[in-house]
Amino acid sequence: MPKHSPSSLNPRAPLVLDTRDLPRRPGALRTHRRVVPAPADLGVELIGVPEGADLDLDLRLESVSEGVLVSGTVTGPVQGECGRCLRAIDYSLTVNVQELYAYENSTTDITTDEDEVGRMQDDLIDLEPALRDAVVLTLPTNPLCREDCPGLCPECGVHRDDLPADHSHQQIDPRWASLSQLNRTEE
Ligand SMILES: [Zn+2]
Ligand SMILES: [Zn+2]
């Protein structure tokens, strides 16, 4: 199996960072600030960044001895629904990104696993996997509209916020009521 997947990164893809203007001299620095559309499936089951939403990249690219260190923040809108009451959840999420990308054929490239340290493809960095990890780790697996959301009444589906505290369903279902009526006439 080849150590590298064939160079297939598109330098114009929104989450591909082009380092051609960053000198390969430790300490050299470039900032990368731009707004790009979010990729598909940036999130978890109930909550995530909608595809195409604005992602605000505020990154620093720094040359280190065997690669490029990318650090900074990515901010974007998150939408989802409350796991208890299904109300819409909508807020702005900022995640920190810090990832080292080794130059191809550097000692780091040769001596570390690909899941330990990122890899550059020529002068290009694919930020998407690191961003995806950062976003998924930050999102709640069980999102709530608020921490103490009481959820819905399982009987009538009305939000408990909109029901009196003593709300209950003690009344007999009308269908059962007529059945007990039938029983009575048979007696
Ligand atoms: Zn809720
Ligand atoms: Zn109810």
Image (cartoon, rainbow, N blue to C red):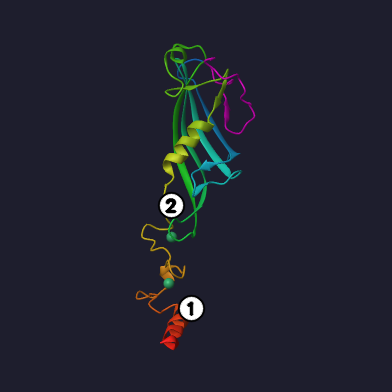
Residue holding disc 2:
143
Q: Quadrant of residue 151?
A: bottom left
Where residue 100 sits, quadrant-wise, is top left
User: In x, y percent, where is residue 115?
Assistant: 44, 24
Q: Look at the numbered disc 2 and give the secondary structure of its residue.
A: loop
Other-residue count near label 2 (Cα within 10 Å), few / some / many at <14 / 14–19 / ≥20: some
Q: Nearer the viewer, residue 77 or 176?
A: 176
Quadrant hosting ligand 2: bottom left
Which of the two residues, 9 or 5, is positioned nearer the viewer here? 5
Check disc 1 and give the amino acid type. Arg
Q: Does residue 5 belong to the magenta stretch?
A: yes
Q: Residue at coordinates 55% horizontally, 41% vertically from top-left?
A: 41
Residue that appears at 45% across and 61% down: 85
Foreground of the two, 131 or 67: 131
Q: What element carries label 1?
A: helix
Circle 2: residue type: Pro
The percent position of residue 36, horizontal first and vertical second, equals: 60, 38
From what the image shows, is residue 155 above or below residue 149? below
Label 1 sits on residue: 175
Give the magenta range.
1-23
Residue 177 percent across, percent down from the top left: 44, 81
